[in-house]
Structure formats: structure tokens, C-alpha cells
Image: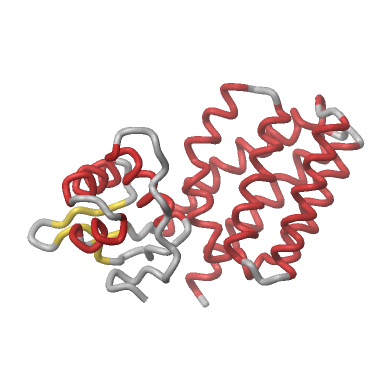
């Protein structure tokens, strides 16, 4: 473990091109959403700069932006800490996610073509492989891609824009329950694919609402366990 608590190999390479402060921001946000940097963890500018191979200035700018967006808390005389989401914050966001994704599932059932359905099946197979291998990070990534594909198949640009605004926080909340949801989550994905294939808008809406509600309940249950 590194001194900031980062597992070896967890630090992403900074993508080029683009302003350095933006690349540092994206790198830190990825570490937070994957929980390589845990909620409540102290973020030391000099250490993060060393891990990322940059000076402290872009790290400081990235932390200020993350603070503005609610990912990081800046505490006077203490420094920066990864935000610890409250149960209410998580509940509100996951409720909004349910509304968006249920409508996306309905629209996907109304308009998805065979290529789109085949893409969903391929993503589901990859997710199932990740679960079988106990690859939590892989399962979380494939889960995000599966839901993003349904949003794409919905064909509503406004809906997709709204979903993109909550996507990273959904990943943040989903990561700690991904192993618990495990196979059941992908069984539910298979049922969704079947409903979309059958163009059953009502069933697809209901299944997506139940699916996202299961995740919401699992997140709250983990806090009580």
C-alpha cells in the first residue's frame, strides 16, 4: 500500500492531450469512484502529486473542483478528505436513477434493433464472467456499460444527458454492494434483455424499476450490517 492508502497499480496514467489540471481531476475522480480512495480518506497534496508525477498546483486545483462538485471535503486547518456520502444523499440519487433508467428501459423496448440487443447480450456475458472471476472492479465497469447501452438504445438525448450527470455517483454507490448483488444483478439484466427483445415496454419498465430498487436497498442494508 502507498502512503495515501492506494493499492499498487491503482494510480491511473494521465491521459494526453488536455490541460494538466483536467487530467489530474479525471485521475482523482476515477480513484474516488472506484473507491481506491475511500470515503473519509485524507488526501495529501504532496503524496497525490508524487503518485501522479505532477506538481502540487494541478492537484490543488483538482481538489478544489472536486470539493465544488461534492466529491471532496476541504476542512480548515485539516486538509482535504474524500466525501462520506450520507444515507439520505445516496437515497436521493438512487431514487432519481430509478426514474431515469425505468424510462430508458421503456424507450429501449420500444425502439431497440437486433444489433442493440446483441450488444446488451455481449455486455451481460462479460459481466457474468467478471462475477464468476470475483472481479468486482470488472463487474462494476460492465454494469455501468450495460446501463449506458440501454440509455443509448432509448434514443433520448436529454434523458442520456441527465443520466450521465448521475452515472459516476451511481458507480460510487454500487461498488461496495457489487459483490453482494453478484449473480442476481446479472439474472435481472438477462430478464431486462428478454423484455426489450419482446418489445414489452411495460415489463421492461417494471423490471428496471425493481432492479434499481434492489441496488438501493442493498446499499442501505450494507450500512446496517
48 on left or right of 218: left
Quarter residue 203 falls in: top right
Q: Position of residue 130 (x, y in %)?
A: 70, 63
Q: Based on the displayed image, in which of its 4 quarters is residue 110 positioned?
A: top right
Residue depicted at x 65% and y 52%: 143
Q: Would residue 171 appear left or right of 69 to someone viewing this image?
A: right
Left or right of residue 12: residue 45: left
Above or below, comparing residue 11 to residue 167 in the picture: below
Image label count: 0
Residue that appears at 71% across and 28% down: 154
Please name whichever residue, 167 or 131, is drawn nearer the observer in this view of the structure.
Answer: 131
Depth order, front residue of 191/32: 32
Q: Which is nearer the eye, 172 or 125?
A: 125
Q: In this view, does 167 lie above or below 38?
A: above
Say which residue appears at 70% left-offset and 52% top-offset: 211
Q: Quadrant of residue 146?
A: top right
Name the colouring of the figure.
secondary structure
Rendered location of residue 209, percent (x, y): 69, 45
Residue 93 vertical position relative to residue 84 in the rendered view, above or below: above
Q: Position of residue 126 (x, y in %)?
A: 74, 55
Measured as percent of width and height from the top left, residue 184 is found at 75, 63
Q: Quadrant of the N terminus?
A: bottom left
Say which residue appears at 76% left-offset and 57% top-offset: 186
In the image as oriented, which residue stretches furthest toward the right?
198
Amino acid at each position: 500500500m502507498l502512503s495515501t492508502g492506494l493499492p499498487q497499480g491503482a494510480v491511473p496514467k494521465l491521459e494526453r492531450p488536455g490541460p494538466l489540471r483536467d487530467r489530474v481531476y479525471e485521475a482523482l475522480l476515477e480513484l474516488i469512484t472506484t473507491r481506491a480512495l475511500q470515503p473519509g480518506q485524507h488526501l495529501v497534496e504532496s503524496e497525490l502529486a508524487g503518485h501522479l508525477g505532477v506538481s502540487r498546483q494541478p492537484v490543488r486545483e483538482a481538489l478544489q473542483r472536486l470539493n465544488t462538485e461534492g466529491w471532496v471535503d476541504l476542512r480548515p486547518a485539516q486538509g482535504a478528505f474524500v466525501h462520506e456520502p450520507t444515507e439520505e444523499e445516496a437515497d436521493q440519487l438512487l431514487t432519481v436513477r430509478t426514474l431515469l433508467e425505468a424510462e430508458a428501459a421503456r424507450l429501449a423496448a420500444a425502439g431497440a434493433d437486433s444489433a442493440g440487443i446483441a450488444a446488451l447480450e455481449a455486455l451481460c456475458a462479460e459481466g457474468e464472467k467478471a462475477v464468476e472471476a470475483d472481479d468486482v472492479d470488472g463487474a462494476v465497469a460492465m454494469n455501468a456499460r450495460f446501463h449506458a447501452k440501454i440509455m443509448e438504445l432509448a434514443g433520448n438525448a436529454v434523458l442520456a444527458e441527465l443520466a450521465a450527470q448521475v452515472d459516476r455517483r451511481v458507480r460510487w454507490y454500487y461498488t461496495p454492494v457489487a459483490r453482494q448483488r453478484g449473480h442476481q444483478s446479472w439474472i435481472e439484466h438477462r430478464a431486462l434483455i428478454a423484455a426489450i427483445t419482446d418489445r414489452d415496454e411495460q415489463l421492461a419498465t417494471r423490471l428496471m424499476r425493481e432492479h434499481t430498487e434492489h441496488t438501493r436497498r442493498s446499499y442501505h442494508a450494507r450500512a446496517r450490517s
